[in-house]
Amino acid sequence: MYKKTFILTLLAVALFACNTKSKESKAEAEVKTVNVNELIGSLDQNVDKVVIVSGTVDHVCSHSGRRAFLIDSTGEQSIRIEAAGDIESFGKELVGSNLKVKCIIKEDRLTADDIQQKEAAVLEKHPEDAEADGENCSIEMQNINQMRQWMKNNGKDYYATYYAEGISYEVAD
């Protein structure tokens, strides 16, 4: 009786272990691999999902290396990758390299109040940019106005910005 119980226990453990590995393999296989253009076109659909994004490193933040920017083949679109997971930092030597970065897509939302506070801070910091008719010609104000226009055009009460938390990467050259 003891032998039967022992064998059944071993069999159950073996089946559980195989089933767990199978689920992990399946989850890994379901991770989408996309280029920068494909990712940018579907950012809102990939929030909090794991993806693998491929692109060329255009810039690595010089102070800490905690941020890198991947660009598409035209150099017109980019995504910010924050060092996280197994990534301590990105080395400057990666600039110009093609990477495949496993990451989680994240979204930050700016509300109308947040944007109003940004505008007030810009006008306080650069009062010379405010013209008599209330217009502002600074780049910062152009960005603020673009955010407001996007919210209006999309019927949203927030402005979304996206970035990726890097989990791991490999040089794809």
Image (spheres, rainbow, N blue to C red):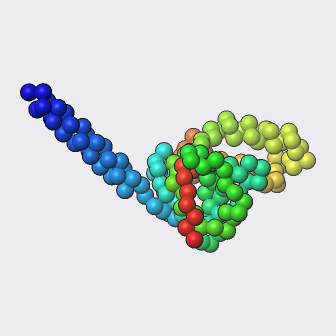
As drawn, which residue projects farthest toward the top?
2
- Please say if 131 is above or below 55: above
Residue 42 drawn at (x, y percent): 49, 57
Tell me if I can see residue 160 in this picture: no
Drawn side of residue 138 relative to residue 24, left or right: right
Residue 119 location, quadrant: top right
- Foreground residue among 163 and 3: 3
In this rendered view, identify the residue nearer to me: 111 or 51: 51
Q: Residue at x 34, y 52 (%)?
A: 25
Residue at image coords 74%, 48%? 64
Would you place residue 104 above or below residue 78 in this image? above
Q: Residue 63 versus residue 22: which sits nearer the camera?
A: 22
Q: Is residue 40 left or right of residue 134?
A: left
Position of residue 13 measured from the top left corner of the image (x, y, whole percent):
24, 37
Note whether residue 85 is visible.
yes
Q: Quadrant of the C terminus?
A: bottom right
Residue at (32% x, 47% y) in the render: 21
Residue 76, percent from left and from top? 64, 67
Q: Is residue 49 above or below residue 172?
A: above
Q: Work out whether residue 107 or residue 83 is closer to the camera in this orientation and state it.
A: 83
> Residue at position x 67%, y 35% from top?
113
Which quadrant of the figure contains the N terminus?
Answer: top left
Q: Is residue 46 left or right of residue 128?
A: left
Residue 146 % position (x, y): 67, 53
Please state the total of marks drawn on the protein image: 0
Q: Is residue 155 left or right of residue 27?
A: right
Q: Quadrant of residue 74?
A: bottom right
Q: Residue placed farthest to the front in the image?
A: 3
Q: Residue furthest right?
A: 128
